[in-house]
Amino acid sequence: MAEEQTEYQGKATMEKITSLAKRRGFVFQSSEIYGGQNGAWDYGPLGIELKNRIARNWWKEMTQLHDDIVGLDAAILMHPRVWEASGHVENFTDPLVDCKKCKSRFRADQIPPENLAEKKCPECGGELTDTRKFNLMFKTHIGAVEEEANIIYLRPETAQGIYVNYKNIIQSNRMKIPFGIAQIGKAFRNEIVTKNFIFRTCEFEQMEMQYFVKPGTDVEWFTEWKKRRWAYYEKLGVKMDQLRWHQHGPDELAHYAKDAYDIEYLFPMGWKELEGIHNRSNYDLSRHAEFSGKDLQYIDQDNNNERYIPFIIETSAGLTRTLLMLLCDAYDEEKVADKGSDDDWRTVLRFHPAIAPITVAVLPLMKKDGLAELAQDIRNELREDFATDYDQGGAIGRRYRRQDEAGTPFCITVDYESKDNQTVTLRFRDSMEQVRVHRTELAARLRDEIKGYQRSK
């Protein structure tokens, strides 16, 4: 576990991250030309590439590298009884208070206790309303007529789609316990307060895996999945001293949980949850068996047809929250030369090359004399295997800076020497080192650099 830190030690601030995200096309405010939609964000050209790479990396980690985990894509709209069985209709609430004077709205558990006791607004000092429950699920209607029988919910989590399909997957794919089901998908929560950019939003994506185990082995598997999930962030190249474990206390545990830990990251606004690992006991399948009337017991044919309701170990991470974490973790400001001035700084995103939105940018030194055509030919050779970009506008130094801000780990400069001997300049983002490489060796060199990548800062 990382040592306790009381303040953010890096150079990133939420203002800098938000500005860079818009400037370079990572994230835009939803419906911005109409004043914006609170709690919703759009992912631009670099943002969707980064998001897709995070998702593919997680999917590979969970399914391709594990023989005992399969995938699922469940529907967003589910039978309303699903959410009664899961406890969301009854328990998925936040305590809400409003200020009668300034009309601000707060979660009661996130304002100072003295303000709550005195019913005093932390913003303006006005009187607060009594605390009331606020259900976080979005409710809508399905069918031609808006009537109570047609109420349906936008799912607040992806896990329930896994639980109601657990028996189908056992039968169709002949899965044997222990085994897991992984899913990436949209979820929706009618948050009282949305803040800190894309950290807490009403519409988001989850990356969840539910691992079904025999009762009595759950503690062992819980420990194992904590270890595996921690190791995953090491593979991503995250600064591990910016991560720590937080165990849920008795007053924090969800109603279904036997034990729960969060992996927390030191965001610019402090330590916040990045991923949860939960021992959900057999609560979920027991409830769905009760509410559906279906037998959800597992029949262990290798052990005298023993029957039991499996326990579930859950790993649950936010895809969009992971994206924000990687933006914060990769952000750096670096003085690149001492020219007697403090102005020669660069902003750089030090993404691991495996998740960078652009892997390699190809830059002709000049637009003329056939250099642009040669650069395009080289890009076409690489684009089948790598995410590429092409930029021929402006001074080469400015183009490097643009790629640094986008997090591009490698740049290839095509110059006049390239026409003579087919070699190009390969520039490394982190060190800014430049080497000459023959164009026929570029693909192999890039693959080696990605495989052996070690973050220097």
Image (tube, rainbow, N blue to C red):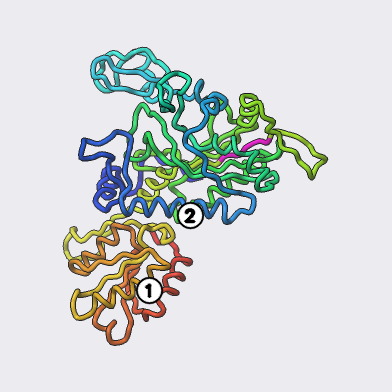
Please tell me whether mark 2 or mark 1 is closer to you in this view. Answer: 1
> Looking at numbered disc 1 in the image, what kind of residue is underneath it?
Glu
Q: Position of residue 253 (x, y in %)?
A: 54, 28
Q: Earlier in the sequence, mark 2 or mark 1?
A: 2
Q: Is residue 430 left or right of residue 84?
A: left
Toward which corner of the image does residue 401 lie, by quadrant?
A: bottom left
Quadrant hosting residue 8:
top left
Query: What is the magenta range?
Result: 310-314
Name the secondary structure under disc 2.
Answer: helix
Could you tell me which residue is drawn at 48 percent across and 20 percent down?
149
Q: Main secondary structure of the magenta part?
A: strand
Q: Which structural element holds mark 1?
A: helix
Q: Is residue 312 magenta?
A: yes
Q: Nearer the viewer, residue 371 or 76?
A: 76
Residue under the image location 52 percent in, 29 percent down: 79
Q: Which residue, given by chain and number where applicable, does mark 1 sit on?
A: 381
- 226 part of magenta stretch: no
Residue sticking out furthest to the bottom: 420
Circle 1 residues within 10 Å: few <14, some 14–19, many ≥20: some
The quarter of the displayed image where residue 429 is located = bottom left
Q: Position of residue 258 (x, y in %)?
A: 61, 31
